[in-house]
Image (tube, coloured by chain):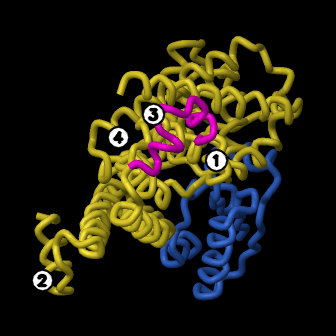
Chain colours: A blue, B yellow
Amino acid sequence: MKIEILGMGCSNCNKLYQNVLEAVKQSGREAEVTKVEDIKTITGYGVMSTPALVIDGVVKTTGKVPKVEEIKGWIK
Amino acid sequence: MLKYLADSLVYTLIGAHPGTRLGEALDFFFYDTMKVFLLLGVIIFGVAVIRSFFPPERSRKLLGNRREYAGNFLAACLGIVTPFCSCSAVPMFIGFVESGLPLGVTFSFLISSPTVNEVAMIMLWGLFGWRIALIYVSTGVIIAFFSGIVIGKLKLEHLVEDYVYRMRMRETAMAAPTWAERFAYARDYTKDIIGRVWLFVLIGIGLGGWIHGYVPMDFVLKYAGPGNPFAVIVAVLIGIPLYSNAAGTIPIVQALVEKGLPMGTALAFMMSIVAISTPEMIILRKVIKPKLIAIFAGIVSMAIIIVGYLFNAIL
């Protein structure tokens, strides 16, 4: 599974990154988690508000920091 | 109701005497604190629910490739309801420009979004009444409308970084959130905002209470009253570096208004606090050239100064 966190390095992007790491750890799934700061990739996903969460190429949320529980629901 | 609570707290529980300076200052502090936090909780929650209907991706679609004037007005209004954080300024800017929106219309959005700030609106409502809050919001829209039109007329497209025009943005189909999700979002948003501003609000109201009780009545009148023709300009220049601290400054401004600061000067001061923020300028540098940033900041400052003098003349 490939999880991407889109955002240009704001504090909420880091919060989301930590939540994702925590969710992955708790669920025990194998996942490749990357931070995407390149604006071309971000706009390529059609995202206008960051941080955004992309799982296997699908935009899950934009402009907010979902909770660990929520993220776990998506990566099961 | 709140007034009664504050009175009984200060005069009965603490035992301060009505009419004394300390008593007045404490009463003022507790009354304003309760009022402001009540308003902050309720209104930010409401605003967040409304905002959950207007993610920027939706605003982009609503604006389509609208032309000037009507586009500027709609953009200025959408700027209020679309959630905005300066960290999203770049993808938003690209999204708007890429969809064919004229530069001036894009700027109307970018100006109104921070200028009409919900925390500032609530503080004004709580401390000055709903009329001043309404004047603030409509003035913000008007400033964003005209500044955007001026930027559009100046034909500054060449001052946007070239790569922006080569970007392509894909459409995203996101599922609309359920009501439960909207409320959860609003709750988190309210918590987040109050968590960030409460200390400034307390300090601001505390200082305001102190000014209210201790600073002589004509003190401000002497320096920043109608007798000083440069007061508005100075107020705006002081306000620019104070970005994001509207929550803490408005109670102080309120106390100063009581001591003779003209309302137009006060409004100009607080608009300059929220409208022009250094971090946003630095982030926008990624998509526009320094000259356009300077023009943008210059036009918005000018607009705020004009509005300040205008209100001093009519309010």
**Between A4 and B222, the one nearer to me in the picture:** B222
Query: Badge 2 is on which residue?
Result: B12
Magenta region, residue range: B218-235
N-term mark: 4 or 2: 2
Q: Residue at x 70, y 67 (%)?
A: A3
Determine the CA span between mark 1 and mark 2: 40 Å
Q: Residue at x 59, y 13 (%)?
A: B68
Mark identifier at residue B133: 4
- Tags 1 and 2 both on a single chain: yes
N-term mark: 4 or 1: 4
User: Residue B168: x and y, percent?
Assistant: 76, 34
Rendered image quadrant of residue B170: top right
- Tags 2 and 3 both on a single chain: yes
Contact flag, marks 4 and 1 (Cβ < 8 Å): no
Mark identifier at residue B264: 3
**Other-residue count near label 4 (Cα within 10 Å), few / some / many at <14 / 14–19 / ≥20:** many
- Label 3: element kind: helix
Q: Chain of mark 1?
A: B
**Other-residue count near label 3 (Cα within 10 Å), few / some / many at <14 / 14–19 / ≥20:** many
Query: Badge 1 is on which residue?
Result: B238
Residue B232 part of the magenta segment = yes
N-term mark: 2 or 3: 2
Give the quarter of the figure containing the N terminus of chain B: bottom left
**Between B258 and B156, the one nearer to me in the picture:** B258
Contact flag, marks 1 and 2 (Cβ < 8 Å): no
Determine the CA span between mark 4 and mark 2: 33 Å
Rendered image quadrant of residue B148: top right
Rendered image quadrant of residue B172: top right
For the residue marked with disc 1, what is the amino acid?
A: Ile
Contact flag, marks 3 and 1 (Cβ < 8 Å): no
